[in-house]
Image (spheres, helix red, strand yellow):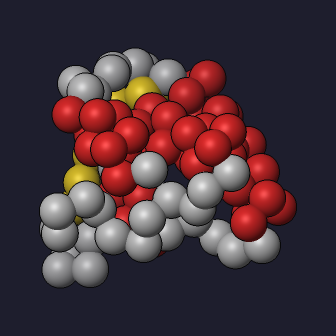
Amino acid sequence: MDKTVAAILAQPDSTGTITVRRCADDGQTITHKATWGTGLARQALRKRYAQTFGQQSPQWLDLLHPAKEARILRAAINNETPAPNHPPNS
């Protein structure tokens, strides 16, 4: 799963019409642009991940671009392997 996650993280961020802002633990604001469809897919996959694995997705995913988070969640569900608790090589 780590290789799959690393490959997803290496992909460029997509763009869209909505702005997604997240606050990191250190107080830094992270801003992403995404489409509504990406946001809806992310929410649906977060719910499905929790149902599949009986736990919420790892917190570090919250700071990623919504499309990357969705791809990682989809890969975890499809591979029946939870996402790593930390980013690869951290």
Residue 37 left/right relative to 85: right
- Which quadrant of the view contains residue 87? bottom left
Q: Nearer the viewer, residue 36 or 64?
A: 64
Q: Residue 7 location, x and y as percent?
A: 29, 34
Q: Is residue 87 visible?
A: yes
Q: Nearer the viewer, residue 49 or 1?
A: 1
Residue 82 left/right relative to 67: right
Q: Residue 70 location, x and y as percent?
A: 53, 39
In the rendered view, tell whether residue 90 sits above or below residue 72. below
Q: Residue at x 61, y 23 (%)?
A: 37
Q: Residue at x 55, y 28 (%)?
A: 38
Residue 32 left/right relative to 83: left
Q: Residue at x 32, y 44 (%)?
A: 3
Q: Residue at x 40, y 19 (%)?
A: 16
- Which quadrant of the view contains residue 57? bottom right
In the rendered view, tell whether residue 29 sits above or below residue 42. below
In the rendered view, tell whether residue 81 sits above or below residue 71. below
Q: Is residue 65 visible?
A: no
